[in-house]
Image: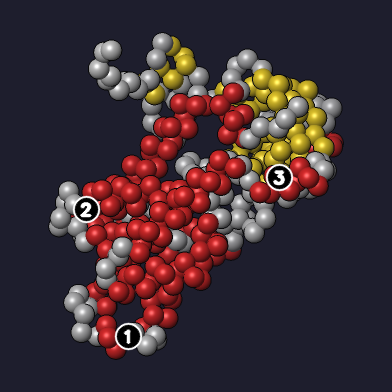
Amino acid sequence: MTPITISELKELAGETPVVAAIHAQLQSRATRKTKADKPYLELAFADSTGHFTLKVWSDSPIYQEADAMPTGEVFRLEAKWTQNQYGFDARDITFHRPDDEALGDFYAGDAATREKQDLDFAEIQRLCESIVDPRLHALCQLFFTQLGDRFRRTAAAKKNHHARRGGLVEHVAQMMRSAAALCPVYPELNRDLVLTGVLFHDSGKLWENSYPEHGFAQTLSIHGEMLGHIPLGIELVNKLWRDLMESDDTAAWAALKPSSEDTRLHLLHLIGSHHGEHAFGSPVLPRTPEAFALHYIDNLDAKLEMIRVAYTQTQEIAPNIFERIFPLPTNLVKPLVSFVLPG
């Protein structure tokens, strides 16, 4: 049986069982208890396309074997898969370690996902190259030089959107396309500042949602846990900015308007305010046109990604009505198809 990816499994599995095999890395294992005080295991698996959680009950014939599975290991899982609003269920599941050839293919990642992320990263670089302000342009290039590899293996979130290795690149690329399209429509926006803000708005997630050089299980960082990505992003930009100010180009920048200090401050404001509300983690609220634009571009891309994924994974509970998937607030309705002129 040829293995499929986790994203493909999510699209195929529903209330009717689907027999399939996947290769997945065990991200974490936790022992929980039911309301009746019976233990069960909660196993989190991931590959290059996504992740899912599987419950193994204490009366399952594989419970002891699953309890001994080392985290970080890659397994071949074969089962009769079903999926509902509570997640996956796997009947008659078996698992074993794949051979070296299969492991090599797994770590290389899904070819389609890898190709998309390569194109997205190239688009980010192209748009950053178009930044005219020499300080913001140099800041972006320094980021790519120092942290480009880490950036390319970071997720945009732990669960809700672009929650996969390289997901941050996909999210930033789409936001940059949106920003580049909107800036000519709203000429009061500082295009250089908005594009730079898009690149750095989630840069703290390089420590909050990072992945190791090999593998698809997100790692935990004490800095990410204790500070969160917004303070970390502000700290990163300040560090890179100090490095720039120590370069040979600093003297040539002294006469530039706006001043370097004002430019740095406005960029930091974009990072600090991009969640839009105190309740969602922003220490400050948006106070500039660029800050409002960045917040809504970020929110739009995240929401549309959640909706796109939800249509592939949720069940149709009535004609053209799809069951709600968290964190979306309501059931979805089948979208209206585009109009096509007859014949």
**Residue at the disc numbered 3:** 105
Residue 29, image x and y in percent?
71, 44
| In front of the other: 229 or 48 | 48
Are dots 2 and 3 in contact, CB under 8 Å?
no
Question: Around disc 2, counting alpha carbons within 10 Å, would you say few (fewer than 14), some (14 to 19), or many (20 or more)?
Answer: some
Amino acid, disc 3: Asp
Quadrant for residue 230, please give it: bottom left
**Residue at the disc numbered 2:** 183
Amino acid, disc 2: Cys
Q: CA distance from mark 2 to mark 3?
A: 41 Å
Of pointers 3 and 1, the one earlier in the residue sequence: 3
Of pointers 2 and 1, the one earlier in the residue sequence: 2
Amino acid, disc 1: Thr
Q: Is residue 126 left or right of residue 84?
A: left
Does the image show residue 235? no
Mark linked to residue 250? 1
**SS class, disc 3:** helix
Of pointers 2 and 3, the one earlier in the residue sequence: 3
Look at discs 3 and 1 and give the one toward the viewer.
3
Residue found at x 37% / y 88%: 248
Look at discs 2 and 3 and give the one toward the viewer.
3
**SS class, disc 2:** loop
Q: Is residue 192 above or below residue 297?
A: below
Question: Around disc 1, counting alpha carbons within 10 Å, would you say few (fewer than 14), some (14 to 19), or many (20 or more)?
Answer: few
Question: Around disc 3, counting alpha carbons within 10 Å, would you say few (fewer than 14), some (14 to 19), or many (20 or more)?
Answer: few
Mark linked to residue 68? none
Residue found at x 37% / y 73%: 138
Q: Is residue 273 left or right of residue 103?
A: left
Which residue is outermost to the top? 319
Residue 180, image x and y in percent?
28, 52
Q: CA distance from mark 3 to mark 1?
A: 47 Å
Does the image show residue 125? yes
